[in-house]
Image (cartoon, rainbow, N blue to C red):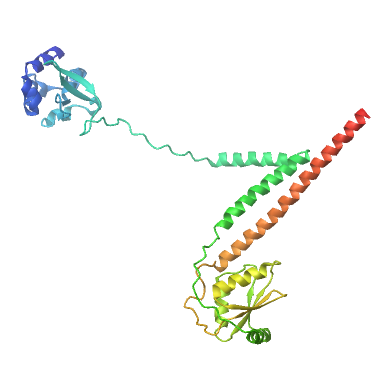
Amino acid sequence: MLSKASIRGIIRAVPHPLIRDSSLGFCCVFRDLFKASGFHNISHRHLRNYGVLRPFVEAQCMSRPCYLNLFGSFSVCRKWLHMRYMSSESIELKTENDVVRFSISKRCDKNGKGLPTQVKKGTKRLKMSRKAKVNELRLYRLKAKKKMNSPNPEVRIRYKLDKAKRKETWLVEKLRKFEVAKAPAEKYDPEILTEEEKHYLKRMGEKKKNYVPVGRRGVFGGVVLNMHLHWKKHETVKVVCKPCQPGKIHEYAEELARLSKGIVIDIKHNNTIIFYRGKNYVQPEIMSPPDTLSKDKAMEKYRYEQSLEHTSEFIEKLEKELEEYHKHVAKYKERKEHAEFG
């Protein structure tokens, strides 16, 4: 086997232009060196001396970042060397002051930049086990139970108030999903009706029995569709709003007039609106406007609105209770002070 001193001497004996400009000549020198030293007779028992020959496995020419696989042509030797003795680092040959030296460096890419030895993996979020989730819920319930059964009335009221406010915020966010952008209004000439025509249409609408109900869902696409279906055979149609909050009937009248392009003839005290289709009425191709909710979504929106209304009333009630409690505490302190100093 060759020693380190003998290898270094052979490398210094190689002409400088040959090493710097020709990697082929460098490979030929080491090939002859291996043949002369009997490297083809290496066995597993000589692997302890592999540290001496290790620099020749992968080398770089002096100034160029070029790696030489010297065992590329020696398939037999490549089989003999076990993979666990191979290194992930590279040996670089440097020439400074006409001296060739080995130096251990990291692998480089084509641009000469070092390649990362370890790839950082993205941090995965740890999933909670079922037992951990159950324990967390149990702890939350215990804390809530303590607050609910607290002897201090203020703690109980504040717990209910915070819970109601969280629910109110959640309901407002849910209702935002049901907001539909209004389509730009189409330009059309409104028909001018005389007082006599209005009186005649009003009496005709009251006598006829055809009507369209507007229930708890409010105004949605199905209401407008039914109005157009009634206008096929009748000039007027009644829209009955039940149940209807006070003052909501006028909002319904404006919204239905915008969506159906009909004319409001009269709004009665029993939450009934009479619509006239117009003299030049033409049935549209799409009778249900696209900027309205469906039947199921309108029902879901109504439930959220009802829940929000009840939650707001409950919050007002709790705030009044809290104010009354603070007043009661202040009066009790005043009486106590008067009793002590009186």
Figure quadrant of residue 330 = top right
Q: Is residue 105 left or right of residue 145?
A: left
State the image coordinates of residue 298 (x, y, percent, origin top left): 58, 65
Q: Residue at x 60, y 65 (%)?
A: 299
Query: Residue 45: in sight, yes or no?
Result: no
Q: Residue at x 49, y 67 (%)?
A: 184
Query: Residue 182: in sight, yes or no?
Result: yes
Figure quadrant of residue 251 = bottom right
Q: Is residue 320 left or right of residue 194?
A: right
Quadrant of image for the N terminus: top left
Measured along the vertical axis of the image, is residue 296 above or below residue 319? below
Measured along the vertical axis of the image, is residue 226 above or below residue 29? below
State the image coordinates of residue 176 (x, y, percent, origin top left): 56, 56
Figure quadrant of residue 100 = top left
Along the line of sight, the residue nearer the viewer: 322 or 102:
322
Q: Is residue 317 left or right of residue 3?
A: right
Along the line of sight, the residue nearer the viewer: 200 or 272:
200
